[in-house]
Amino acid sequence: MADAVYEEMNETYRIITPSTLNRNQTGELLGMISVLLGGWFRIYPAFLAGFPVNDGGMFYTMIMDIQANHFWLPFYTSYNSLNIPFAYPPLAFYVGAIINSLFHVPPVEIVRWLPGVMNTFCLVAFYFLAREIMADNLFGGVSTFVYAMIPHMYEWPSMGGGLTRSFGMLFMILTVLCAYRLFKNENQKYFRLTVVFGSLAILSHPESIVYTLGVCVCVWLDKSRTFKGFRYGIYTSIWILLITMPWYGMIVYRHGVDVLVSAIQTGKHSLWSSMMLVNMDGITSEAYLDLLGVICVLGIAVLIVRKEYFIPLALIVIYMIGPRSAHTIGNIMLALGGGFFITEVILPSINNSKRGLIILLAITLPYLFINSAYQGYLIAQNHVGIPDRAAMRWVSQYTAVNRRFLILTGNTDAMCDSVSEWFPALTNRNSLVTVQGREWLLGGRFEEFIAKRVEIQQCINEDVECINQKIEYFAKDIDYIYISDKSTMFRCVPNTTISQTMPNVVKKLKLSPGYFLVYEQNDVFIFENRR
């Protein structure tokens, strides 16, 4: 039986790997396969969800704000009625607004699909970066396959909020690619391209330029270390600042420097946050065995042993300068390390054995595909479902615009609470505990706000007195309490360890004389404060 299976796979191997395929052609073929597979896994969650995955509600509003302002940059976004400065890099919002105006694609569909599409383009850019670093097509193809199959890389960049993350990541990779060629070849052509892509990175995501600058410094240390290369770096930086000055100059003129400083203070810079690198579960997000995570870390270790320091150094720099999103951006360097380990350690150990390669693929590929498909299914569960959308339509139709809502879902991770983020976008009402946008307002008090939000979300299984005590931090009083009894999330996927029953606070509110149940449908409850 085993021999029959082997012969079957051996025949398949002959079909997909003809003897005329050399090392470079194998790398190119693997790169194309990786882009196709990775592209599917990046749009698969949005396909299953039927709505933007997880977040993106604020960006949905910002697209419409730009259109309502006749494509002039608004002073503030209308999101959540907080007068949040429209200081977010606007490139992705303008692209979304243009797509809507030209092709009449609804903004909610743009937020649903465009992140995954742009994240797929990141795979193409990554392949060329990997190939450039090692000057080897096979390394480029293998690294791209590793990058394509890391579950975390089709989570955050492909979610609704990935609208800006995917743009920022794409232009960051392209900037690093051109900077690598610039410092290696000192060619004027790559100077211009680095300026263009660096400018687009600044206009895409607030953290992209920080990571881009840090990695480019690592490139200079590895490939140049000359005064001419340093001069190119200074000139590039100056030109990028000049090109993007109309945008950030307008932000500073309108809102002052404080609004930018406020956002910078939310980067979670601490020793503990930098130590996230040792937790593979939070980096690769593999549902079962952290196979890719282990391979990537081993690759980083082998690179250090062989005194190839660029990739390990860039990984450390990413975690030092921006811990908040380093678990996403760091996967770029980890995937390069994984590609190195496979091409330089695993494949040579097989020693051109066809049988050994077939056995390796037979063990690893099914696991990787099942892992990716299952993780994509889990991610797709985190979206605003039909019951909540119906309840939000009721809110927008039957409550006054200036009403304030307390949203209770039990989700203590604010970044994975889709109901909380989308509520202000779909109702045009104020949500007291929604986090999105407050980084531009709270500065150093942002972490305090998140901690207080965690406390009040835990009231979902307590009594009314818990709400009355915890709400004082957010407001003196509330008009409505919106409770969604959907699955709680752990790292943005459903937490199956918690059984779903009617929240205790719902039972208590029904008995409370101060609150009146005005809406109840499909585990969504809305109580009006009658006091």
Image (spheres, grey):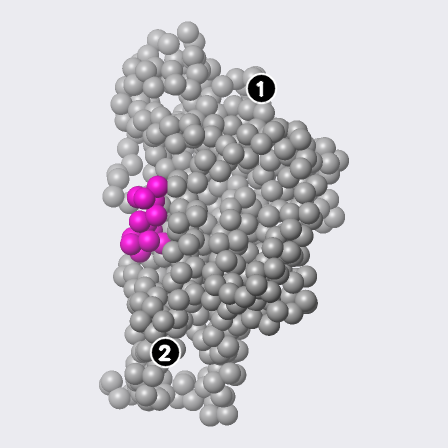
* x and y, in percent, of residue 112 in the image: 55, 47
Q: Quadrant of the C terminus?
A: top left
* x and y, in percent, of residue 60 in the image: 59, 39
- Return the residue found at the far top: 531
Task: Assign a secondary structure to mark 1.
Answer: loop
Mark 1, residue position: 401
Mark 2, residue position: 344
Residue 367 visible to the viewer: no
Examine the structure image and report whether residue 278 is included in the region drawn in magenta.
yes
Q: Is residue 198 above or below residue 483?
A: below
Is 132 positioned to the left or the right of 320 in the image? right
- Marks 1, 2: nearer the viewer: 2
At 40% from the left edge and 35% from the top edge, which residue is drawn? 414
The image quadrant that residue 58 belongs to is top right
The foreground one among 363 and 201 is 201
At 34% from the left edge and 38% from the top edge, which residue is drawn? 488
* x and y, in percent, of residue 100 in the image: 69, 45
Q: Is residue 290 above or below residue 33?
A: above
Q: Amino acid at mark 2?
A: Glu
The span picked out in magenta is 270-283
The foreground one among 239 and 31 is 239
